[in-house]
Each structure stands twice: as structure tokens, then as C-alpha cells.
Image: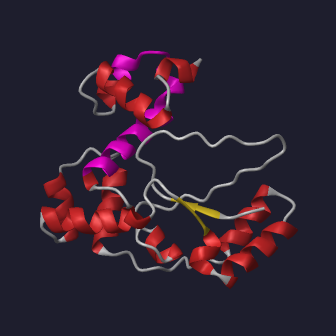
Amino acid sequence: MELNVVGAMTSYRDFPLSAGQLLMGVRFRPGAWQKHLGIPGDRITNGILPLECLWGVRARRVLDLIAEATSVEEYARAFEAFLDPELYASPVQRAIAWMERRRGLVSLDELATQAGLSARQFRRVCLEQAGLTPKFLARVLRFRHAFSRLTDSGGEFAQLALDCGYYDQAHFINEFREFAGRTPGSYVR
């Protein structure tokens, strides 16, 4: 059993599993993992790092608790016990949360204003904390929203694309392929 930290991914990447292997993930809100994991987001973008490299003995204790768990819920509780739920949200994290609520459909100037920074400063700090530039993070958030609505779209990808802020269906399909490794149609099938 191993615990790894997977940085923000900027393109599709497959993680094959062996028969009987269990994969469980913890997704942090963009910009929040630096405080939990102790590493700036841009240092592991597109990378994988053993949690033990970041947490040392603390990671081994988490692994021991997980080894004793008998259900997915117990795995989650074991890991959650090592996270601080009361972390201070910085102005940049609050601006990113606002961008999440808007599903990535924001202007970068609005984001910077939300954080009380210039657009250039916001870009630098967002990249450091979330591992992605604000523009790329907005694309990811828009994609997540579209992806969550995919099965309810009834194959009407043109309308889904417009509803989710894409310029047209081709724009949506190209971005879907980039982030999911396949077209929306092949994913639904």
C-alpha cells in the first residue's frame, strides 16, 4: 500500500489499476493543498510524489491507520484525521472559491479584484497555490461542470457546450478530449 500526492494535471493521464487494486483519492479545493500538504502547487503540477516525502513519520502513521481500515469510509476517516479542518482561507483561496462557484466563468480582472491583488500578482500567487494559472484553472472548472452534466445532456453536446460557457461544440469537444482523453460521445457510450 502506498500514499502518493498527485499534482494538478494539465492534460489527460491514465492510471491503470491491477486486478483487486483499490484506488482512493482525496481532492483538495484548488489552492488549499499547499497548507495541508506543505508544498506549493506549482512544484508538483503534472507530477506524483510519495506523501512520505512531504509528511515523513506522519505519512507512515496515516498508512498504519489505513491498513487497519476495513471500508472506504474508514480509509477516508483515517486520512481526514490528519488534516486540519480549520485552516485560514487566504484572499486568493477565497477568490478561487468564488471562481469555483461561478464554474470558471469569470474574468481574470474580477478574480484579482476579489483577492485584492493586481492581475499579474494574482496569476503568480494562484500558480503557486493551485499549481495552475487562473486561466487554466477556469478551464478546468468549466470542464468539471460540463462533465457533471454530460450524462443528462442526452447527447445534445452543442447545447451543453453553450450552457457551460464554451464558444461552440467543437471548442467543447476539443477541451473534453484534452482533459478526459476521449470525446464526450465516446465517454457517454
- In percent of width and height, residue 87 lies at 47, 79
Is the residue 22 above or below the residue 89 in the image? above
Residue at figure coordinates x 68%, y 76% from the top left: 59
Based on the picture, tell me whether residue 53 belongs to the magenta stretch.
no
Q: In this view, does 114 lie to the left or right of 157?
A: left
Image quadrant in which you'd find residue 103: top left
The residue closer to the viewer here, 117 or 8, is 8
Residue at figure coordinates x 62%, y 70% from the top left: 51
Res. 70 visible in picture: yes
Farthest-out residue, bottom: 57
Is the residue 34 above or below the residue 49 in the image? below
- In percent of width and height, residue 176 lies at 42, 30
The residue closer to the viewer here, 49 or 38, is 49
Q: Is residue 67 left or right of residue 156?
A: right
Q: In this view, does 97 lie to the left or right of 149?
A: left
Res. 94 visible in picture: no
Residue at figure coordinates x 73%, y 42% from the top left: 17
Q: Quadrant of the C terminus?
A: top right
Residue at figure coordinates x 31%, y 54% from the top left: 99
Q: Give the range drawn in magenta.
A: 135-160
